[in-house]
């Protein structure tokens, strides 16, 4: 039974009503995270019209007559099929989850074309060799914090698949972070949240993921935590120091993260206020929210280590509160991608 139309309908209803859903995350390394995927998760990704349109626009411009390697093709080979429809000469599709072999083969068969074979390889891309070099690297291993599914390490390794001057789809991705006021939800949202397996209890110093995080909660302009331009070299271990100046009086209790995908210059997807498949990671730092005045400053020191299959992160926060006449501090470390 094809449940994708039903999944797409339900997702559109959540998006239309901006239902705020919250889940607690587990700290999974990249192998465990990929193994945890279900066909429902792939159907949700395929039903993401914002993301799908941006990728399709660029694929249609770029891949005709070219050899494509698709890293993380997924259980529906969704974008490998886009490349076939756009006139690629061949697609080498790599997928870790061999348990989706039947689903992938069935999906590929729906767009069969002798002019563009899709060859599927099962395993982590870092363990695979291709029989030829490619002209386009297409990948979909971007997480809610853009690097937490291993994209930086994966793309750095996958450059060995490419011819000189190859095109990267997407061209870049990054993550932004911002102080936020406490997350408050309507009772109707809380009921829906429980029905879809979420939680209504937000614990301090634990990562949560929030679908439709309200942009009205942002207390300052977001700052860049990380950015990877895939045609360039970039470090896998780095530190960032960010400073946020509150743009209004209010309460602050934590940080919210937004990923951004630059598919190309004209097609940019963000999880900030858009109806995309990615929820927003939310870290509640203070059990009791801190009262701030406009102009108060939050300093955030960030450490990122992407050198292994379990990306790790750390934040140290200092928030100066004029109304409370004190400086509040908090720190948290976490690893891997959430599920």
Image (cartoon, rainbow, N blue to C red):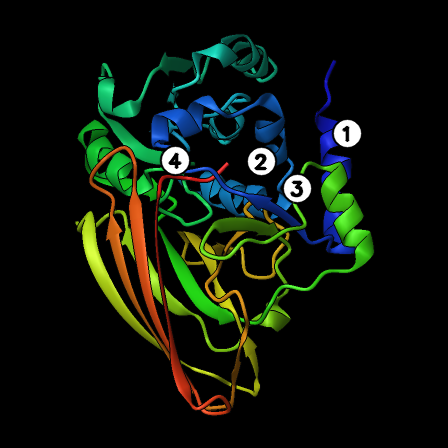
Residue placed under numbered mark 4 in the picture: 139
Identify the image quadrant of residue 5: top right
Q: Position of residue 54 (x, y in %)?
A: 53, 47
Count of labels shown?
4
Circle 2 — which element? helix
Residue placed under numbered mark 1 in the picture: 6
Q: Position of residue 95 (x, y in %)?
A: 40, 20
Q: Residue at x 59, y 44 (%)?
A: 23
Q: Nearer the viewer, residue 258 or 155?
A: 258
Residue placed under numbered mark 3 in the picture: 198
**Mark 4 and mark 2: Cα distance apart in space:** 13 Å
Q: Earlier in the sequence, mark 3 or mark 2?
A: 2
Q: Residue at x 47, y 51 (%)?
A: 206
**Mark 1 and mark 4: Cα distance apart in space:** 26 Å
Q: Nearer the viewer, residue 49 or 125?
A: 125
- Label 4 environment density (alpha carbons within 10 Å; few <14, some 14–19, many ≥20): many
Q: Position of residue 87 (x, y in %)?
A: 46, 28
Left or right of residue 107, residue 168 in this image = left
**Mark 3 and mark 4: Cα distance apart in space:** 29 Å
């Amino acid at each position: 039974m094809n449940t994708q139309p039903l999944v797409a309908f339900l997702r559109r209803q959540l998006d239309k009503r901006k239902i705020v859903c919250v889940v607690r995350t587990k700290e999974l390394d990249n192998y465990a995270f990929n193994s945890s995927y279900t066909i429902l998760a792939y159907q949700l990704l395929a039903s993401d019209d914002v993301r799908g349109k941006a990728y399709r626009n660029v694929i249609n411009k770029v891949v005709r007559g070219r050899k494509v390697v698709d890293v993380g093709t997924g259980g529906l080979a969704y974008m490998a099929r886009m490349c076939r429809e756009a006139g690629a000469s061949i697609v080498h599709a790599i997928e870790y989850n061999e348990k989706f072999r039947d689903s992938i083969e069935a999906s590929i068969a729906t767009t069969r074309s002798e002019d563009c074979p899709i060859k599927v390889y099962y395993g982590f891309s870092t363990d695979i060799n291709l029989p030829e070099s490619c002209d386009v690297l297409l990948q979909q291993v971007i997480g809610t914090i853009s690097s937490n599914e291993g994209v930086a390490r994966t793309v750095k390794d996958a450059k060995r698949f490419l011819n000189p001057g190859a095109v990267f789809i997407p061209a870049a991705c990054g993550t932004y972070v911002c102080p936020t006021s406490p997350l408050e939800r309507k009772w109707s949202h809380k009921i829906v949240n429980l029905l879809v397996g979420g939680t209504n209890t937000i614990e301090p110093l634990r990562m949560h993921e929030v679908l439709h995080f309200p942009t009205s909660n942002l207390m300052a302009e977001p700052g860049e935590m990380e950015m990877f331009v895939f045609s360039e070299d970039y470090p896998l271990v780095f530190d960032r120091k960010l400073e946020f100046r509150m743009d209004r009086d209010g309460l602050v209790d934590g940080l919210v993260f937004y990923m951004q995908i630059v598919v190309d210059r004209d097609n940019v997807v963000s999880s900030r206020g858009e109806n995309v498949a990615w929820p927003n990671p939310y870290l509640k730092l203070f059990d009791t929210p801190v009262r701030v005045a406009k102009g108060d400053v939050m300093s955030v020191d960030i450490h990122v280590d992407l050198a292994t299959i379990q990306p790790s992160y750390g934040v140290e926060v200092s928030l100066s509160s004029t109304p409370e006449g004190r400086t509040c501090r908090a720190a948290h470390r976490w690893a891997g991608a959430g599920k």
